[in-house]
Every structure is written in structure tokens, then in C-alpha cells.
Image: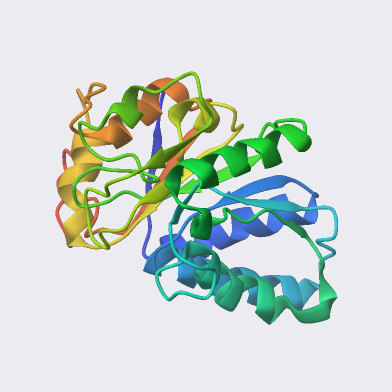
Amino acid sequence: MGVEIEVLDDPARACAAMLVGAAAAGDDIVLTGGSTPRRAYAEFVDAVKAVDADLSGARFWFGDERCVGADDERSNFRLANESLFLPLGDRASPEIHRMRGELGPEAGAEDYERQLAEAGIPEFDLLMLGIGPDGHTASLFPDQPTVRERDRLVVGVPEAGLEPFVPRISFTFAAIARAKNVVVLATGESKAQPIAAAFGSGARSDPHVPSSYLRECARELIVLVDPAAAACLPGRTADA
């Protein structure tokens, strides 16, 4: 599949606009963790309040989670809850499907596959992802067996490849392939080399760079980056 790379001064704002459209349409949306998504969620809340959008038909999912409690500061759900769900207040009541990290990696993965099955295994309308400085996406880390898993939709990740070093639950590329639109959101110079390795000219699927598999599994792939994250792409510099 092709990839559309957009270099923007404020990728989080562009991502927030996509989130508003999907949520207002009652779509299935997959959220991710991280500081840049947190900014996108704050922008999303502001936009929803400005137009008084009805989000009651939307369903929110998570692409990965740390195996901690929902109130742990490392939890992706806690980040989304504090920056997105709680600030919406009573004006919207979307359906939320949380990965239960407290169950542990394997039981948590089985529980989430059950939640997906009970919902009819949706085709996700918008699936958000980040990319790590090691090239991982979701919680699919370089050279781990989960990178090549295609039979399951959700897997346990007993050993994280990057801080925080806690077990994880993660969508596989088989689950990501069910999404109609995949959006990768990345900012900062630490993301420049993995962005180029995964999506630059001549990039190939490489288990050492898990994000590179998005090109072959995503139906529509948009990569939203700031100039610093785009610095290693051909013809770009950090201040271009």
C-alpha cells in the first residue's frame, strides 16, 4: 500500500480534526498513548465542545496497553480518560472498550479479543498509532515474534522492548489491517530515523522496524509528522 506523509507544524491538531469527524459520524476509533496524542485529545475535546457534537454513536478502542491498573500513571487508558473522556463531561457518552491491563498480558489479550468478538469484530474507521525511537508501533517491538503474528488480533507482550519495561497487550498487524484509515502521529527529532526507515523512499518490511509493516497491511495510511520528525526523509531538514 502507499503512504501519505504530511509534514505539519501542528500534527496533533490535524489528527484532532480527523478524530472529530470520525466520532461525530459514530465511527469505531482506536486510540493510542503518548504525549503527542495527548495534545491531539485536548484539541479534540475543544473542537467537540465548540460545535456541541453528538458522540453517542462512537465506539472507542485501544491499540495497546501496559499491564497496570487503569489508574496507574503508565496506563494508556488513564491518559485518554484524563485528556479526552472526562473533559467531555455529560455532553457525550461514547462507548468505551478498555484493555484490562491489570489481568496481565495473556489474560488481558484474551479478554480484549472477546470484547472484539462480542462487538462483531469491527472494521475500525480510524486507527491511531505512534512510532517509537526503536521503530515499534502499538506494542509490537523489534524482532519479537508478535511482529509476524497474523492469526490473532490481540496478543500479550510479556517483555517490552522499551521503557516502561512492563508487560503489554497489543493489537497485531492483523487487527490493524481491519482499519479503513490508519494514522501515525509522530513529533520530535527522536522519531526522524524510524520515520525514514519505516516510510521513506525504498523502505521495506523489516522485523527490526515493526512500523515498516504498516505499508503492507494498512488500507489507507497517513503519517502526520512535524519538521523535526521528517528531517531524515529525502529532501527534508529539521527546519525545512
Q: In this view, does 131 lie to the left or right of 163?
A: right
Q: Which residue is drawn at 57% across and 38% down?
A: 110
> What residue is rendered at 50% in x and 25% in y?
174
State the residue in front, 92 or 219: 92
Confirm whether residue 130 shows in the render: yes
Residue 98 or 5: which is nearer the viewer? 98
Determine whether 130 is above or below 84 in the image.
above
Residue 222 in which image quadrant: top left
Left or right: 225 as drawn, with respect to 109: left
- Relative to 39, is 134 above or below? above
Q: Which of 125 and 105 is in front in this view?
A: 105
Q: Position of residue 100 (x, y in %)?
A: 57, 56
Q: Position of residue 118 (x, y in %)?
A: 77, 36
Q: From the top left corner, tell me how far across and down residue 34 is, in percent.
A: 39, 64
Res 158 → quadrant: top left
* In the image, residue 125 above or below residue 161: above
Q: If the image is split into quadrants, where does the C terminus sit?
A: bottom left
Identify the residue at image location x=59%, y=33%.
179
Count of picture labels: 0
Colour scheme of the rendered structure: rainbow
Horizontal arrangement in the rendering, residue 158 relative to residue 14 (left or right)? left
Q: How far across and how far down the image is residue 238, in percent? A: 16, 59
Tell me the quarter of the image containing the N terminus.
Answer: top left
Regarding residue 10, the answer to whether it shows in the image is no
What residue do we see at 19% from left, 47% from top? 134
